[in-house]
Amino acid sequence: MEIWINPACSKCRSAISLLDAEGAGYTVRRYLEDVPSPDEIREVLERLGLEPWDITRTQEAAAEELGLKEWPRDDGSRERWITALSEHPQLIQRPIITAEDGTAVVARTDEAVRDALSR
């Protein structure tokens, strides 16, 4: 499994601590440094079963600058959202864990981390 993190994020640190406590094997991706490509974002969205606007941090300064709150949330706008996430990775909700079974979870709670571990 892989976990996308921002080391400055307390939820990311908590998820890592829980994975370590459970003895889980995982790799860390610091997605602000190792920025996901649009294809990687599409793949994670498919694994999550979500749309790009579902994993976008709309309170970030970059979201405000881009006017994301006013962007349509429809099929025709999907690629625009994906491009924004790739160009501004700080907008990606975190942490995201890609599970062994091919799914993924946004692991903001201990329960979500345990869910990923059970897959």
Image (cartoon, rainbow, N blue to C red):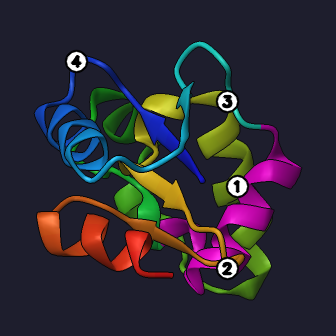
Around disc 2, counting alpha carbons within 10 Å, would you say few (fewer than 14), some (14 to 19), or many (20 or more)? few
**Number of the label disc, if any, that sits on residue 101:** 2
The residue singled out by tag 4 in the image is: 8
Identify residue type, mark 3: Glu
The residue singled out by tag 3 in the image is: 87
Circle 3/circle 1 CB separation < 8 Å: no
Q: In this view, does 43 lie to the left or right of 18?
A: right
Ranked by sequence position, the earlier of labels 1 and 2 is 1
Ranked by sequence position, the earlier of labels 2 and 3 is 3
Ranked by sequence position, the earlier of labels 3 and 1 is 1
Identify residue type, mark 1: Ile
- Residue at the image position 32 percent from the left and 39 percent from the top: 64
Viewer-closest of 42 and 65: 42
What is the CA distance from the residue labelled 3 to the residue labelled 4? 20 Å
Circle 3/circle 4 CB separation < 8 Å: no
Q: Quadrant of the N terminus?
A: bottom right
Look at discs 1 and 4 and give the one toward the viewer. 4
Viewer-closest of 89 and 12: 12
